[in-house]
Image (cartoon, grey):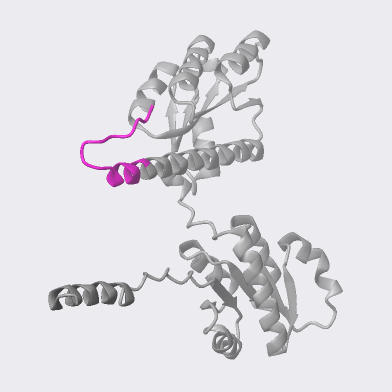
Amino acid sequence: KPAPAALTQKAKLIAAKVVAAPKPQPAPPPRVRVLFVDDEERVLNALQALFRGEFDVSTAPSGAAALEMLKANPVQIVVSDHRMPGMEGVQLLREVRKTMPRTVRILLTGYSDLAALVGSINEGEVFRFVKKPWDNDEIRDVMKEAAAVAAKLGPPAPKARSPRSAGSLLVIDTDASLAKGLQRLISAEAVVHQAATPADAAKILQVHDVAAVIADLRAGAAGIVSLFKLLKAKRPETLSILISDRPDSEVVADLINQAHIYRFIAKPVNGRELRGHVSEALRRYAAFRESKAAKALGLAQDVAALPDGLVPDTA
């Protein structure tokens, strides 16, 4: 017969296998975030009561309030009434489409003639219409479909950083009027610096975060060509925009081939054209910055996960 001590040890081993520590359960997926927009409080209360058990629900009493909320807290689904004072639902969903194209958009409407809205709705690319008063089963089905689409589209875009924090603009021109005019056009998006010569511009570039350089060729063709080539080699994220009334074809060809200038604008400068190019340059620069920050964060996390004394090869 086995000794009592051996039996005791065997019992412990059996118990250890039977009463094993339970495997940790994965955390439940985050609930889909939904924003309901309506100027009638009773409607918002009804929708919140209907869906708060299924979704992470927020409400807004107007289109303007909804846009402000979305800046701080992006959602995956926006459900808006159409007929609201100030900003109608179609206008709201159009703005949502522009700024958060991955957000699923649903329109609530009490109108019987939906055909009258189709032209405007095309701009907002509404996922579904839900007619008021709604049927609870019908709207549940619509929301279920919307949640499935939202899951495929991925999480909503994070809060957009103000372009003002993503870089400034630098104008090189002997006349300060271009810089002043651009500042008026772009005041909500970026700070505009002005330099009379390429040499002055180089000093500004050393101390400021510049997203784009806008240079008038009359400020010194040779210096501008050299500066643009230097930016291409050392700071390719900073875009170059050339302005001229009498461009030298050889200079422009050289800048295209060697400096990869972002845009060429002929004088007289069209304000709308300039603003469009500059706004796009700011967006590209912001995207570069965010990508660089994400890469740096990923590297830092990789380093933190390594055993002491080991450093990854970042080459």
Could you tell whether 61 is left or right of 148 in the image?
Answer: left
Residue 38 vs 222, above or below: the answer is below
Expressed as whole percent of the image width and height from the top left, the position of residue 67 reads: 55, 66
Residue sitting nearer the eye, 86 or 138: 138
Residue 125 can be seen, yes or no: yes
Q: Quadrant of residue 91?
A: bottom right
Residue 284 forms part of the magenta stretch: no
Q: Find the residue positioned furthest to the front.
A: 1
Residue visible at 40% across and 42% down?
A: 293
Q: Quadrant of residue 37?
A: bottom right
Residue sitting nearer the eye, 272 or 176: 272
Residue 81 can be seen, yes or no: no
Q: What is the count of numbered marks?
A: 0
Residue visible at 42% across and 44% down?
A: 294
Residues in magenta?
A: 299-315
Expressed as whole percent of the image width and height from the top left, the position of residue 178 reads: 53, 31
Expressed as whole percent of the image width and height from the top left, the position of residue 65 reads: 53, 71
Residue visible at 62% across and 40% down?
A: 276
